[in-house]
Image (cartoon, rainbow, N blue to C red):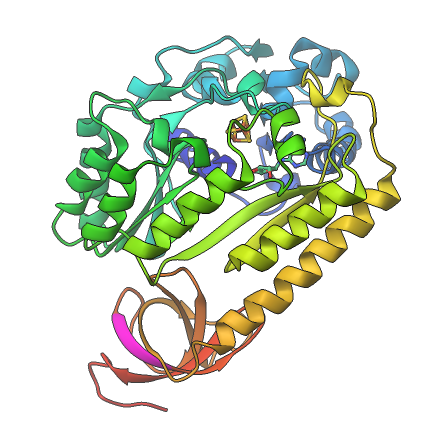
Amino acid sequence: MNFHDAERLLGLLRQDGFIAVDDPKDADLIVFNTCSIREKAEQKFLSEVGRLRRLKKQEPSKRIAVLGCVAQQQGKALLERMPHVDYVVGPQNISKFKEVLSRESGVLIEDNPDIAFEEIPAQRAEGVSAWVNIMYGCNNFCSYCVVPYTRGRERSRPPESILREVRELVSQGYKEVTLLGQNVNSYRGGVSFPRLLEMVNSVEGLERIRFVTSHPKDLNDELINAVASLQKVCEHIHLPLQSGSDRVLRLMNRRYTYAEYLKKVEKLRAKVPEIAITTDIIAGFPTETEEDHQATLRALEEIQFDGLFGFKFSPRPMTKASKMEGQLPEEVKAERLSEILELQDRITEKKNRALEGRVLDVLVEGPSEKDPRMLTGRTRTNKIVNFYGDTPRGSLVKVRITRGLRHSLQGEVISGSPSGRHI
Ligand code: 5AD
Ligand code: SF4
């Protein structure tokens, strides 16, 4: 979401003739797009922005702006703490950034009920895949999470506006869209989320549709059927479990039990046998016992996720969990997180190895970063595949998987190269 916010900000500034430069020394305007989901991200920003104090002193005409969730959280206090910052703009107010730029300094952190009706032209990096917002904000108030406080209430973008953007992206050459929202299943833009998927599925020239993130409590049969039946909707779902312990899930205010979650996973796999399921896990939530932690490890063994993002619990301002008794020491959180990651690494590798010999559709993204003689692309299940070939970016090729590694697959092209040349 943050990454795409930055793309929209760039699009907006380009309209005013700004161009991006690499070095802050060359910039008239320096923008920080900040994240406050965990403390680490926030600290990283604070040390980066501190470093600009001297530059601003040497060249006072440079403007420094702080956007994103840290801006929203700290508001005016940020200007007071960091006098070399000129503007503070929360994530709901990107569209008004230009307006504030015409002033000496300013703070924009108001709630923005119109956010879903704004059309901000994003400036995207070249590629095959584009992010598309479908909703903003979140109403769930998971007890650890700062997002409902920084991004405000859920607001859905009208389907016509989404479709217009997707068609435009296809005409620019994009093959894949990822529909973005904090909780896409509670999309309510006049039609349901599964109906929206159906509408996007009918856009000609589009090859693939992905969506993030889904909340398990709102994952219903209609959505499962849509994933099963809509040809362009990829066989991958990111479905954050957070914990395998019902006691912890209740404290997290997740509104499902592990058994309910598991049942949904089974339903998904019954209807979409190829589906890849990835998840988020928080290690060391307040009061989490060794027993709770073991329940999470058992859940990972039982479900066999394709991949996982794991985080140490990080107390965030305003959230209920930050004020709970029973905060755990850093070492306990770190130890549990590493156990979680190690177990998942083994599972991911095993699952990837099981794909050896299979022929999969791969959307080519371009030369591999690690080895430019190779191409890189993704399967419909969102797994990275590296292979030798000369097919242009954006083509779909059939690749036989020759090796399953921990974080990627290796393969060889068996069709789809227009020149027929395989290296
Ligand atoms: N501490 C640790 N992880 C968090 N997440 C959200 N808030 C916190 C927090 N306070 C994680 C959740 C969520 C992902 C985007 O970030 O796992 O799914
Ligand atoms: Fe945060 Fe929960 Fe909303 Fe996700 S669903 S953004 S974790 S409050």
Does residue 192 sit above or below 278 in this rendering? above
In depth, the one of 86 and 69 nearer the eye is 69
399 falls in the magenta region: yes
Q: Quadrant of ligand 1?
A: top right
Residue at position x 49%, y 72% from top? Answer: 352
Marker count (numbered): 0
Residue 113's spot in the image, x, y percent? 38, 10
**Residue 65 seen by the camera:** no
User: Is residue 253 left or right of 10 when viewed as pictured?
Assistant: right
Q: Where on the picture, by quarter, is residue 291? A: top right
Residue in the foreground of this view, choosing between 214 and 412: 214
Residue 250 vertical placement versus 106 (above, below): below
Quarter of the image with the C terminus in it: bottom left
Image spot of residue 124 (x, y percent)? 38, 45
Query: In which image quadrant can residue 370 be found?
Result: bottom right
Residue 276: in sight, yes or no? yes
Residue 256 is a magenta residue: no
Q: Is residue 277 left or right of residue 227?
A: right
Question: Residue at the location (32% across, 90% down)?
Answer: 422
Q: Main secondary structure of the magenta part?
A: strand
| Closest to the observer, 70 or 274 | 274
- Vertical comparison of 269 with 72: above or below: below
Viewer-side residue, 99 vs 169: 169
- In the rendered structure, which segment of residues is drawn in magenta? 396-400
**Residue visible at 76% across and 36% down in the picture:** 288
In this image, 236 relative to 68: left or right?
left
- Residue at 21% from the left image edge and 85% from the top image edge: 419
Please state the horizontal and vertical placement of residue 197, each as a whole percent of the image. 23, 40
Rendering coords of residue 336 (x, y %): 77, 49
